[in-house]
Image: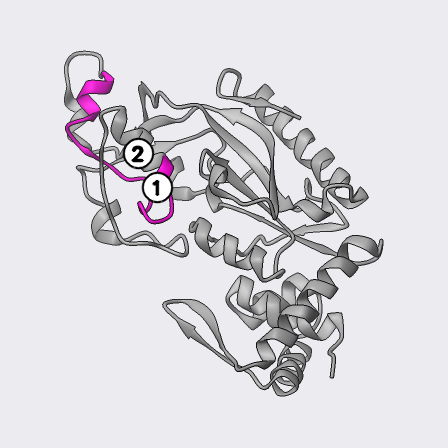
Amino acid sequence: MAVSIEELSCLDCTIWLKSQSKASDFLRVSQPVVSRNIKKVSDTFNISYFKDDGEYEIIHDQASTRLDVQRKMHQEMRFEDKKLILRFDAFKRMKSHLTEDVIKTPWRIGVSSDIENPTLFKNLMDSSIIDAWMSVWPETTSLNSTYTAIPVSRYVAYIGATKNHPILSLSNEISIKDTWNYPLYFGSPEDFPILFQKLESCGFKLHRGKRMNRLVYLAGLLTSKNYLFPISPGSGTQFERELVALPVKIPIEFESRLVIKTQFLNSFKLDLLLENIKTSHQNMSAKYPGWIASLL
């Protein structure tokens, strides 16, 4: 037995956005409709789901194969049918300029999503729950041929410090060597293994913290006056906007890359998304000259 694309979307958007109310907002249907459709999908495929560490996990049996097949069919329909909406997401800190005003129909961005874990994004892509994802190079070099990572922009990142950080009391101009005396926070080495290796080879002392699936700042870590953080132009997080940018550029060239399944590279809907992103990054390049350059 199959379920409709509208019914399965209610479950998948709840998993993606972490709540039925946010799925309701994204799909623009009432919350009772979301609940009713989730129950139908659960009954049809004999599955149940629960939250584990803030993320939804599905409990299933052999029916999961049928669910996977259904999701892939629905994703193909989303790319082929002009009326169907596609799902796009990016790291929260990359999304300040990727708003609903920029990302237009037939794409819709998960504005309430706050994912910071690339592994979680990859799982959502593998499951055909989301259709495209903005990632950071060089981590995208680990993707297999199922995916293509399209270069979108190149940008530089600087070191940021909290306003009471002891490094700000240095009398001389702050140098990169001064930053080596303090731990740099850059997520988890499980999620950014290539970047961790590159940053450590530059001399930075990286904080090897716990994996955070979502943008939940650990109070003890982020209020500590001893930590440093990377900041980039147009950061989408309130925390990073409150940091003081040091005159220290991280000696690595970063790239934003749009990750999509290779089978959809010739889709006219992808062309529309790239046009939206191109406009956004050209505007960012004009606003932050020398910080970011569009590659589209």
Q: Tell me where residue 285 sits by quadrant.
A: top right
Element carrying mark 2: helix
Marks 2 and 1, how far apart at CA: 6 Å
In front here: 54 or 77? 77
> On the image, numbered disc 1 is attached to which residue?
193
Q: Is residue 167 magenta?
A: no
In this image, 267 relative to 8: left or right?
Answer: right
Q: Amino acid at mark 1?
A: Pro
Q: Tell me where residue 38 sits by quadrant.
A: bottom right
> For the magenta stretch, what is the residue range?
175-194
Task: Determine the main secondary structure of the stretch shown in magenta.
Answer: loop
Above-or-below relation of 10 to 42: above
> On the image, numbered disc 2 is attached to which residue?
197
Above-or-below relation of 109 to 158: below
Q: Is residue 187 magenta?
A: yes
Q: Tell me where residue 160 sits by quadrant.
A: top left
Q: Residue at x 33, y 29 (%)?
A: 198
In the picture, the quarter occupied by the N terminus is bottom right
Q: Quick one: which residue is furthest to the top in this view?
A: 172
Above-or-below relation of 61 to 113: below
> At which x and y percent is residue 260?
63, 45
> At which x and y percent is residue 55?
44, 67
> At which x and y percent is residue 267?
78, 44
In front here: 161 or 130? 130
Residues under numbered marks 2 and 1 in contact, where contact means CB atoms less than 8 Å apart: yes
In this image, 137 relative to 190: left or right?
Answer: right
Q: Is residue 63 visible?
A: yes
Q: Residue at x 53, y 69 (%)?
A: 19
